[in-house]
Amino acid sequence: MSIYRSYFNRNNTLISNSTTNTGQNPVVELSFGASEYLIPNYGFSRFIFDIDLTGMRNLISTGVISTACTANMAHTLQLKNTSSFEDLLNTKMTNGRRRATSFNLFLFRIPKTSGDTGDLQYWDEGVGYDYNEFNLAVNNSQGGGSPLTYIDDRSFSNRPSNWNKRQLIFNWSQPGIYDNLNVGNVTYDDLEIIDTQYFEFGNEDISFDMTNEINGILTGGTEVAGWGIAYEPDVENITGLTEAYCVAFFSRHTQTFYEPFLETNYDDLIKDDRNTFTKNQTNKLYLYAYVDGDLVNLDEDPVVNIFDSSDNTVVSNLSTCLRTKGIYEVVVPNSFNSYNAPCEFFDVWSNIKYNGETLPNVTNQIILRASSSKMQIGSKSNDPEIFGFDFYGIKQDEKILNTDIRKVGVIIKKAYSPQVLLSNVNAFYRIYVKEGTTEVQVQDWTEINRTPNEYYFIFNTTDKIPNQYYIDIKVNISGQVDTYKKQLTFQIVDKK
C-alpha cells in the first residue's frame, strides 16, 4: 500500500448571520453558544473547503495509481486539532471560549443551487483574517498622528465568501448554505451527508471517510463545489448559553506542518515470487515494461501461458492486470501437483502491444520449489537475526526538491555479513517527521516491494510538506519483529 496526499485549494469559516470573512486565518474555529459577534448573542460557525485533486488525477491517468488488480482505494480527510498541543480538558481556550466536548461533527457536500440551471455553487475563499473588526492605535514613530491616530484593521474583511454570499455578485441558495430548521430553500434534510464523527473530549483530530465520495468524483459520477463541516442542528440551535464553546483545527494557511489534507491509500505492492516459486501455493509473477529505462503502460493487458520443460501446457490464458505504471501482475494458481520439485517451467507473456505495434512474446524461466524448502526442522531453536541496510535512490542527509519522485532501493543483508544478501524477507518502512521528541507520522508501516533482483519503494515528494524526514525499517522473520530506527534521514525543500 502507498499513500498520496491532496491538499485544500480554498477554505473558509462561515459565521452565522455575519458578513465576516476569515478565509486567510490559519485556524478553523467551529463554535456554538454565546457570541460576542452577533445580536442576539448566540450563534455558530461552519467550515467549508475544496480539495485539489489534480495530482491524484494525473497519477491515475498514468497508471501509477491503478485499481485494475484491486478496487481497494480509500480516501480519508484529516484535520489536526489545535488542542493536541495543549492541556485544555475542562478549561478555556486562549480566546476565552470553552472547549466543546461530547458532540458530533458531520461532513456534507455543498449542494447545487435550487434554481433551474442546477449549476454548482462555486465560491471564493476571501481575504479576511480577523473574526471581528477593531481599530489600531499608532503614534508618530509608527506613522500615525500626534499623539495617536486610529487606522482601519486591514486583517478584517466582509468580502465573499461569507454567510450570505459565495462570490461578489452571487448569493448562496440559502444563507449559510443550508437551514438547520428545515424551512429554507436548502434544508439540512436536503444535504448529502458524507460521514459523521463523534468527539468525546474535543481534542480529537478529524478523520472523515470520503472513499465513496472521492471515488465517485474520480469516475465522473459525482460533481461537487466543495464540502462543509458543521455541528449537528441540535447543537447549533442551542440557545441561552452564557459561554461560547469551540473546537479548532489548523487550516490550509497554517505555518505549521499540520496542513489539512485528503489521504489516499492505494495498493501498488509488488511481491514477485519468481525466485521463490513454491509448490502447493498461489504465486504471483510480474512483467516490467520499459522504454529507454522508463516504465510505460502497454496498449492492452498481456496474457500468460505456462509450459513445462517438455513444452506441455500447464496453465493457459491467464489474465493479467496493471498493478502500477508499467508493471503487470498475473496470479498463478496451484496447478503443479503432478510435478516433482525442483523442476523447470516457462511463463510466456503474449498480446504485448505498445503504440499500436504488436511485440514478440516474452518468455521467462521459473524453478518450482518444494513446499518443504521453506521448513527448518531440528533440535535447536533459531538464533535471532540481525539485519543491516543499504539504500540507493536517496542519499543519507540529502536535500531533495519537492518536485522529485524517487525509487528508493533497500539492500537487506545479515548484519556483519555484507556478502550475504537476503532474497525472501518481509520488510516494511515507515516515514515520519519530528516535533521535538514527538514523531509525527507521515506514512504508516508499508510493505517494501520485492522483485527478482531488488527490494524497493517509491517515494513521491510532490505531496510532502518541506521538512526533515526519517525512515524506519521493520523486518519480520522466524516469528521475530525487529525495528531499526532512523535508517535514512533526508530533507525535502521547496523549489524556488
Image (cartoon, grey):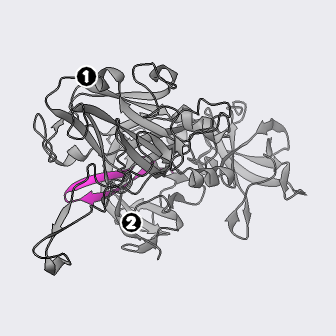
Q: Which residue occupies the extreme bottom position in the image?
A: 141
Mark in front: 1 vs 2 = 1
Q: Residues within 10 Å of mark 1 (few under 14, many from 20)?
A: some
Residue 425: say if magenta: yes
Q: Position of residue 440 (x, y in %)?
A: 30, 52
Badges 1 and 2: C-beta atoms under 8 Å apart?
no
Residue at figure coordinates x 67%, y 38% from the top left: 219
Task: Determine the CA span between mark 1 and mark 2.
Answer: 42 Å
Can you give x and y, in whole percent of width and height, for residue 471 in the image? 36, 59
Q: Relative to the observer, which residue lies in front, 402 or 135?
A: 135
Q: Is residue 368 above or below residue 405?
A: above
The segment highlighted magenta reads 424-446
Horizontal side of 231 relative to 428 (left or right) equals: left
Residue extending furthest front?
146
Would you name the residue on which mark 1 appears?
238
Q: Which mark is residue 91?
A: none
Q: Quadrant of residue 17?
A: top left
What residue appears at the point 60 percent right and 39 percent down from the top-left corner?
A: 120
